[in-house]
């Protein structure tokens, strides 16, 4: 590693600081094409030494010589203060190197915005972060959940498709964005995000009693279903597999059923986590966007159920199907048929229940369909080839 030792400063400082190499290293931090020399003591100011090419230090010149002289003079003038100051600086630097990375200016994150502008409980949201420099990773936290951003061609523009859970308490939340730049520096920025209360209906539902008070054997199935669902929602695909707007799963108008509080058989209340589409049995049900099938099986409450992983912890769920046409592991395209609608599981009649989950949050499917989204998750042709072959083999 190149550091100020190569300037001969180790002799100047080492003599004062017990010749520990860390003391000089503490004064130098590489920032790609730049070396930042952080001086300590009251008479010093922060300055930068530019070098002509990465990895090829060009030392010397009037600036450096001035610095050596200035450091030497000051270290002689403040013999007692310097070692203490150096030790303090060293320990601070150590703390930073073991904990956080070097910090980039806050202005690095130029702009952060989202659609829709006004979020409510259960709103999906599409976030855009504009940076002044390319980054290698951008993340954010909102209401206790972490979202991972992705970029397309421009590594200065980053996106995240996330949202506020149905159960989020209405209020103002900090969206804390962290961007790790190509040079390893980290930029932080915070934005206020307001989540308003949603307006949700109530309803009475009558279903067979075994869906309200399941017997012991049925409870065992419910428990094993939960494990299957947990495994499906545990998938963490590192890239978005969706691309462009989400499309309706059936062409029928949805009922305003998301977030509805339902009283089942006048016995038990249940919150409705999705949107119901009333369609006759046998209606083709299609994928709202491209992704990977992570569950395709019969479950107790959900009936014949398909879950699609769209990447970066976003899933869509299709319930109560009469027939399932896809298999776990299949890559599906937007608009591809997943099966036929039916009335399996806990239902009062034939319909499709569409659910949206992001990172454990239940989001409003109708609002997801209303977002205007860029073309992002195009899969390479070979990927589809593999999926088609695997799908064929399983059938
Ligand atoms: Zn439903």
Image (tube, rainbow, N blue to C red):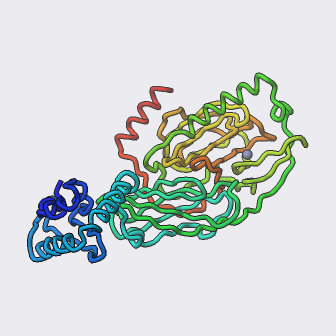
Relative depth, front residue between 287 and 41 = 41
Image side of residue 21 versus residue 236, left or right:
left
Q: Position of residue 305 (x, y in %)?
A: 64, 36
Q: Position of residue 157 (x, y in %)?
A: 40, 65
Image side of residue 74 versus residue 201, left or right:
left
Q: Position of residue 377 (x, y in %)?
A: 43, 52
Query: Within the image, what quadrant is residue 124 found in?
Result: bottom right
Image point (68%, 31%), residue name? 299
Image point (57%, 48%), residue name? 359
Relative depth, front residue between 185 and 249 = 185
The reply to whether residue 62 is in sight is yes
Is 257 rendered above or below residue 174? above
Q: Residue furthest top?
A: 217
Image side of residue 286 versus residue 331, left or right:
right
The reply to whether residue 182 is in sight is no
Query: Within the image, what quadrant is residue 194 found in?
Result: bottom right
Image point (50%, 61%), residue name? 373
Image point (43%, 35%), residue name? 388
Q: Position of residue 42 (x, y in %)?
A: 30, 75
Number of marks in picture: 0
Q: Residue furthest right?
A: 266
Is 213 rendered above or below residue 243? above
């Amino acid at each position: 590693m190149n550091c100020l030792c190569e300037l001969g400063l180790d002799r100047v400082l080492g003599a004062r600081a017990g010749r520990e190499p860390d003391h000089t290293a503490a004064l130098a931090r590489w920032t790609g094409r730049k070396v930042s020399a952080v001086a300590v003591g009251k008479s010093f100011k922060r300055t930068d030494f530019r070098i002509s090419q990465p990895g090829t230090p060009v030392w010397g010149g009037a600036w450096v010589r001035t610095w050596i002289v200035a450091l030497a003079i000051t270290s002689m003038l403040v013999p007692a203060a310097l070692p203490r100051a150096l030790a303090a600086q060293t320990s601070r630097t150590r703390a930073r190197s073991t904990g956080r990375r070097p910090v980039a200016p806050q202005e690095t994150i130029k702009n952060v915005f989202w659609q829709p502008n006004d979020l409510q409980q259960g709103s999906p949201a599409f976030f855009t972060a504009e940076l002044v420099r390319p980054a290698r990773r951008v993340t954010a936290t909102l209401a206790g959940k972490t979202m991972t951003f992705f970029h397309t061609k421009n590594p200065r523009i980053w996106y995240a498709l996330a949202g506020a859970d149905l159960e989020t308490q209405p209020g103002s939340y900090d969206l804390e964005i962290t961007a790790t730049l190509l040079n390893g520096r980290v930029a932080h920025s915070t934005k206020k995000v307001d989540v308003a209360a949603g307006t949700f209906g109530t309803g009475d539902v009558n279903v067979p009693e075994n869906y309200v008070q399941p017997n012991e054997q049925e409870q065992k199935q419910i428990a094993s279903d939960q494990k299957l669902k947990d495994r499906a929602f545990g998938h963490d695909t590192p890239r978005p597999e969706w691309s462009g707007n989400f499309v309706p799963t059936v062409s029928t108008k949805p009922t305003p059923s998301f977030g509805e509080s339902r009283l089942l058989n006048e016995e038990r209340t249940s919150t409705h986590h999705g949107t119901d589409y009333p369609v006759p049995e046998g209606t083709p049900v299609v994928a709202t966007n491209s992704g990977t099938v992570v569950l395709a099986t019969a479950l107790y409450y959900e009936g014949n159920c398909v879950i699609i992983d769209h990447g970066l912890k976003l899933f869509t769920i299709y319930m109560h199907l009469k027939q399932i046409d896809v298999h776990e592991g299949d890559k599906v395209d937007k608009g591809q048929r997943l099966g036929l609608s039916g009335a399996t599981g806990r239902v009062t009649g034939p319909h499709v229940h569409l659910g949206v989950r992001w990172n454990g949050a239940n989001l409003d499917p109708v609002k997801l369909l209303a977002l205007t989204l860029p073309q992002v998750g195009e899969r390479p042709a070979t990927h589809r080839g593999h999926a088609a072959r695997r799908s064929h083999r399983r059938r």
